[in-house]
Amino acid sequence: MKKNFVKRLLSTIAIMVAICALATVSASACTTIYVGGNMTDEGTPFVARTEDYGADMNKLWFISEAGHFHKGDRYLGCPEYGEFEWTFTHDSYRFTYFTNDVFNGTCPECGQKDPTHWSYTEFGTNEKGVSVSATETIYGGKEVTEVDPFVEEKKDGIVGIEETDIPTILLAEAGSAREGVELLAHIYDEYGACAASGLFICDQNEVWYIENCSGHQYVAIRLNNDIVFLEPNLAIIGLVDLDDENIIASKGLIETAKAAKTYVGDEKENTIDFRASYANLGTAESPRVGAPRMVDGLKFLNEKYDYTQDDLFADNTKFTISNVKDGKIVPFYTNITPDRKLSKDDVFSFYQLSSVGKPSNQEIEIFQLFKNRPVETGTVGWVGVGNMANNVFVPYYPMLLEDIYKGYQVSTDVASFSTEKPDTFCNVGTSYVKDADGNWQRVSGYKAYPQNWRDSYYFTFEGLNGYIMNAEQLTGSPVTAADKQYVRDQLNDLQKKFNEEFAAMDPKDTTKAGKDMAERAHKLGLELIDYLLSHKNPFVDVKGSDYFYDAVQWAVAQGVTSGTDATHFSPKAPCTRAQAVTFLWRAAGSPEPKDSTNPFTDVKAGSYYEKAVLWAVENGITNGTSDTTFSPDAKCNRAQIVTFMWRAAKSPEDAPACAFGDVSAEAYYAKAVNWAVDKKVTSGTGADAFSPNADCTRAQIAAFLYRGSNG
Ligand SMILES: [Zn+2]
């Protein structure tokens, strides 16, 4: 997406004087997946793309009413992107659209106060059932862009169309996907393009995917239901025969490539490898934008695809689209075969991959297309806003939407950067400052969330994921594996409910149901943030990098143990027999002992470990150190604790014998150690050692119990 990222960032800083923080991550990281209907369990195609930009910049969703633009009205794009001009050919159709937040009346792109131009737009669906998802930034080769440069500077009122303009103009004007493609082709022919891109124009009957890598040359292809592809900022249209009725291409496509001396194809057959002829392919040495996401995404679609970036660079046909086989025109295909029928949950999960779901995600609208339905319900938009790593997709019938949840429309300031950690909710981030020589330098620090961030759907999910990702930097302690799983489970449960409710819903209720679902998702997002904030590690002596970090947090959360005081866990302190038995008892849920007769003279009535000891004796976990003593204050060694745990698990004997040199087969604890290794409770203290007689530390027992509880 937006090519002018750094330029824009710098200009914003210059204009606002104060350091205004926007970005940490690569600007161009939008990620597309298309799945044809025959590859999905519901028999419907999915057209999906995230918009990725800077982290921590609000994104909003609106409806543009029919006739908002009148026939003959002049459209003016953002001056930051050439200020494209267009005269509407009829009163505009009604359409939904995602757009940037023009906070306090200032365009975040060009800095214009009370902008006279329409705001930057990304996705939408109009009343005719046409959906537009634009654009995925791709890159043109140097040679072709010299022959056919992008049209970036306005001359006599003519400048190339840019991503910011495409959805608005097509949604306002196009009565079908095909009309949209023809209109865009006309604009590329007459005005040119401001940047290279891949984009979708679809309705319930046709899905078109269009790529351009230079000013005026493009290929639009009508996709079929047997194809799946990924597009992470890479041109992916490969060898195509232009005689196919499913292609609309610019007239000078082959000629221009020939003039640039980059043409790959067979002119006689009217074929061209568009990617090879037009795209900037990068080099084997320097990683291509998007390649890690292509690697991960292919693996996600088929477990067997163990490609490296080098494999994909060496052989583009592993991911490109073609319609040529054995010299003949065939339906469009890729060499990507998923190892399963894909569901919408697969499409959602794709966006949770660590290389795909990240802070730069602004929003996503996945279009699910139903051919045999009335036009009003023929398109379902699955909407997510903010970082997709942990998020929820809310379903809508965009054509039937009368109003939109307020959390999608709350205007906020951008997050403000400082090198000092603010007292308010914040994330980590970077910004640019001028050094003494006047050069812009990137600096690390914090980004304070805008004062009303909790009202914003975008900032809620950006905040939740930012905290999960950066808690260690923000608080000194990372979010535990258990808490990450908790967040994921909560969101997955809600997603499941949304899927079911939507399937059972009367489409005419989409406004009310959509608002309700969005509100619940928003509320859950905030609750999860509060939950994580309340689960901060309280111990100064337990660090995120410690092997027992998750175990200690688990043990405290489960009430198995508390610290030795409010801020210390004393991980290296040895564990007494009383403590060990008590921890074990609490991990078992603190069951009340059946018999209150206490045979041990050294276990005092009313002591914190009394019930634990009675329970342990009753269950054959320990017999005491003699008939009348338990030795509560004696240190517990590693052999003893593992034996306690093994007995608590009913002394199973089916584990294979382990090979520790210091555990003899005759030892009382040998079977317990076998069991513990088999259950991954311990792996010993070294390659060949279990150290049975070493003191069991508080950290070790927490780790043993934690691992035992997980398996
Ligand atoms: Zn602007």
Image (cartoon, rainbow, N blue to C red):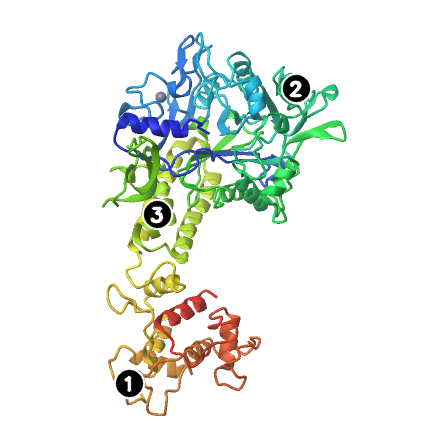
- Location of mark 1 (residue): 603
Q: Secondary structure at mark 2?
A: helix
**Residue 474 in the image: above or below residue 540:** above
Task: Please say whether residue 384 is visible from this viewpoint.
Answer: yes
What percent of the width, then of the height, locates residue 503? 49, 39
What percent of the width, then of the height, locates residue 355? 49, 43
- Location of mark 3 (residue): 467
The local crowd at label 2, few if under 14, some if 14 to 19, many if 20 or more residues have their Cα within 10 Å, is some
Amino acid under label 3?
Tyr
Question: CB at mark 1 closer than 8 A to ligand 1?
Answer: no
Residue ID at (34%, 43%): 463
The local crowd at label 1, few if under 14, some if 14 to 19, many if 20 or more residues have their Cα within 10 Å, is many
Task: Please say whether residue 402 is visible from this viewpoint.
Answer: no
Residue ID at (31%, 87%): 597
- Location of mark 2 (residue): 258
* Disc 2/disc 1 C-alpha distance (Å): 92 Å
Position of residue 533 in the picture relative to residue 394 (left or right): left
Most extreme residue toward the right is: 326
Residue ID at (51%, 43%): 350
Of callouts 1 and 3, which one flags the residue occurring earlier in the amino acid sequence?
Answer: 3
Q: Secondary structure at mark 3?
A: helix
Find residue 62 and report its image quarter: top left
Cβ–Cβ under 8 Å for marks 2 and 3: no
